[in-house]
Amino acid sequence: MKKGIASLAVLLLLTVSVISGCGQKLKQENENLKKQVEAVTGEKASAESKVGELTAKVDELTKANTELTTKVDELTKANEELKKKGGKKKK
């Protein structure tokens, strides 16, 4: 009977130590995961800010491109008109 009680006590002691060890590991892993989440959240905010800046730049460049294309079309049309007037004078 004494051996049974002693075995049970040892088994209980081992079980408690394993459980408490796992608890510490889980707490440490949880802390590590919290730090990773904070880092990723910061990176996400930075990336969103960069996307906003780049989107504004794309809009600005698209507008400039449209204006330049319009100007090229106007100049091409004016050039063609000048060529027609110049061609009439030669004849």
Image (cartoon, rainbow, N blue to C red):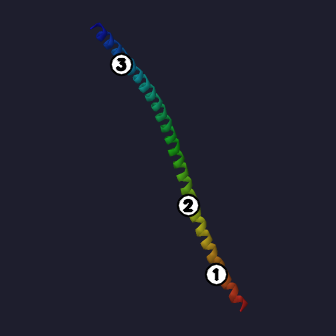
x and y percent of residue 65 in the render? 58, 63
Amino acid type of the residue that numbered disc 3 sits on in the rendered structure? Thr
Quarter that holds the C terminus: bottom right
Q: Residues within 10 Å of mark 1 (few under 14, many from 20)?
A: few
Q: Name the element at disc 2.
A: helix
The image's mark for residue 15 is 3
Residue at 48% across, 31% down:
35
Which of labels 2 and 1 is toward the front?
2
Residue at 52% across, 44% down:
47
In-image side of 28 versus 4 (left or right):
right
Above or below, 78 relative to 67: below
Instruction: Return the disc, 2 or 1, that comes first in the chain's sequence.
Output: 2
Instruction: Return the disc, 1 or 3, that comes first in the chain's sequence.
Output: 3
Q: State the CA–CA distance, disc 3 to disc 2.
A: 71 Å
Amino acid type of the residue that numbered disc 2 sits on in the rendered structure? Lys
In-image side of 85 versus 10 (left or right):
right
Which of labels 1 and 3 is toward the front?
3
Q: Which residue is mark 1?
A: 81
Above or below, 58 relative to 79: above
- Relative depth, front residue between 37 and 26: 26
Q: State the CA–CA distance, disc 2 to disc 1.
A: 27 Å
Which of labels 3 and 2 is toward the front?
3
Quadrant assignment, res 87: bottom right
Q: Which residue is mark 2?
A: 63
The outermost residue toward the bottom is 91
